[in-house]
Image (cartoon, grey):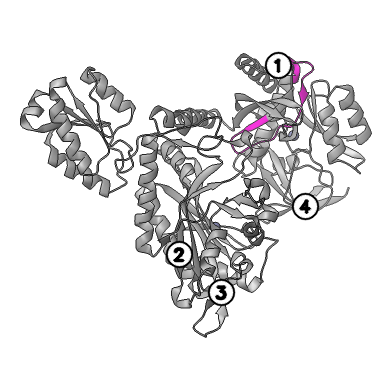
Amino acid sequence: MTEITVTLPDGSARRMPAGTTPGAVAAAISPRLAKAAIAAAVDDRLVDLSAPLQFDARVRVITSDSPEALHVYRHSTAHLLAAAVTHLFPGAQCGIGPATDEGFFYDFVVDRPFVPEDLDAIEKKMKELAAQDLPYERQMWSRDEAIQFFSQHDEPLKVQLIEEKTAGQSEVSCYTIKDRETFVDFCVGPHVPSAGRLKAFKLLTTSNAYWKGDSKNQPMQRIYGTAFFNEKELQAHLQRIEEAKKRDHRKVGKDIGLFTFHPWAPGATFWLDKGTTLYNTLANYMREVLFPAGYVELKTPLVFNKSLWETSGHWEHYRENMFLVQGRDGEEMGMKAMNCPGHMLVFGSEMRSYKDLPLRFHEQTPLHRNEASGVLTGLTRVRQFSQDDAHCFVTDDQIASEVEALLRLVQRVYGDFGLAYEAKLSTRPAEFLGEVATWDNAEAGLKKALDAAGQAYTINDGDGAFYGPKIDFDITDAIGRKWQCATVQLDYQMPQRFGLKYVGADNAEHCPVVIHRAIFGSFERFIALLIEHYAGAFPLWLAPVQVAILPIADRHLPHTQAVREKLTAAGLHVQLDARQEKIGYKIREAQLQKIPYMLVAGDREAAEGTVAVRHRVTGDLGSRSVDEFISAALAEIRNKHVPEPVSA
Ligand SMILES: [Zn+2]
Ligand SMILES: [Zn+2]
């Protein structure tokens, strides 16, 4: 009998008969590993536990601890979902069913949209199939047989997939659950060995979908679900989903009156008065941070002749994402989708010397991107937005120190919001412009800056843009979700495209390097993050209404009006609730609006010239003079991020 050598991750090797399987390898190591095994990586390729091994190979058994495991597990659950749907809805056609970062989905063609009761029934059927521990089996069918089988079974989409994906192959990979009568799918795998391995799953929602995601194609119904290795993790995930729903910025933003949308301006926000106050607080905060750091602020045009976009390269590569406008003399114009090309023109508008560098242009004017209407979502996918954008023009020698200063700015800003974050350095991709030596130099500069700023980071090898390496920041919000916000992007290309020059110390002309950077990212998205992170309960310095003044009766109005004037003069955002409502009702409403402080005034306060202070979390704080309250509030605002006190 022929033997092969199986090399395990610890470097040890075993002789096994040719034709053995990763499942058998796992069993030979330990019964426990065999039981925990889900799939295997053979020479780094993911395969089923039953895939025969014919040649010497490196074999790593995939268990729930392996990074790839959840993906295989969830995709296997998607097959189980499709099996249940085809049982309960004869005639349902199957599309595709991939795993996602959050779970899995499967698309179907059905006669009518699924309703919540359908999901309950489908989930019940999935549990039945799992309880029977039906095996998943890979079968190689001849291509013709597979095409014939799926066309006879009224699965034209599968036929189309086979025709597109396996041209030139004689055999195609299909998977059954139990047997081809029970369920069969065209798929390359791998999957769990049997349905009994799928222990904790839940169907979540349905949505409209289209074959291949294109609205010109066959409409489909998508079922979303999620799966985990055990019930505890599943329940924790479901709780996070509930928490995320409660914090959804679209809901909270409406409840506390920050913004609205109208179908006549898709993807463009109407900032209401409170939202505008919040927006301006952030905009001015960023100015306070950037001006002392040597930035200047610009306002550049919103609409440019296409010559600008041709020079920047956007006309060729990005035009379908831009709003195009025609000038009255017929000139083709494009609304700006980013500030950089305009900043290149400003740099080039004067003779620049090395003594002017670094030159740092900051701009907050609106940008437009022509996103498909189907993907527009609240404040996170919009067509009109503004960035806390800046472009730093530097010499090669200044890259490391400029990036270090930038990293310190990011640290300071996220600290002021109490946000946790991680940094990632993305390096030279396979396809890149420029010299390898320049890239190496730039990457070394970024690493030096990260170390000097004491910034921990991970490396995303080969993930840089084609024109330069970058550092991205992921914020983790209060419920553990990641948001990509700040970015620091080195760019050698755009200054060259615009022919930018500065006169160096050597009296010769040089081309500057530009660093594109944003700390919030877009204001819109950052505000969405803040709403969801704080669940609408902004710290005092950000709260659009910081103080609610609540007179108990009409006769207390003169006193409370005087209090309002004093607070407003001190720069506080104040709301006076002069309605003839019971004080308990007014307090509850202010609480719902997540207003940090409530100042209640009745006979005693009016007589003494004081206010009774309540905090939205800690409740009654007792009587204070108005001046005392103002100075305490201003101190809290100066301190920025203050962890929310825990209710007694
Ligand atoms: Zn599959
Ligand atoms: Zn830029």
Label 4 vs 2, first from the N-terminus: 4
Report the side of 26 relative to 297 (left or right).
Answer: right
The CA span between labels 4 and 2 is 55 Å
Label 1 vs 3, first from the N-terminus: 1
Q: Residues within 10 Å of mark 2 (few under 14, many from 20)?
A: many
Is residue 280 in the magenta section?
A: no
Q: Position of residue 470 (x, y in %)?
A: 56, 60
Asked if disc 4 is less than 8 Å from ligand 1, the answer is no
Q: Position of residue 274 (x, y in %)?
A: 36, 35
Residue holding disc 2: 360
The boundaries of the magenta stretch are 86-105
Q: Are marks 2 and 3 in contact (CB under 8 Å)?
A: no
Residue holding disc 4: 57
Find the residue positioned furthest to the bottom.
Answer: 506
Find the residue positioned furthest to the left.
Answer: 607
Numbered tag placed on residue 482 in the rendering: none
Label 4 vs 1, first from the N-terminus: 4
Q: Are marks 1 and 3 in contact (CB under 8 Å)?
A: no
Q: Nearer the viewer, mark 4 or mark 2?
A: 2
Question: Residue type at mark 2?
Answer: Arg
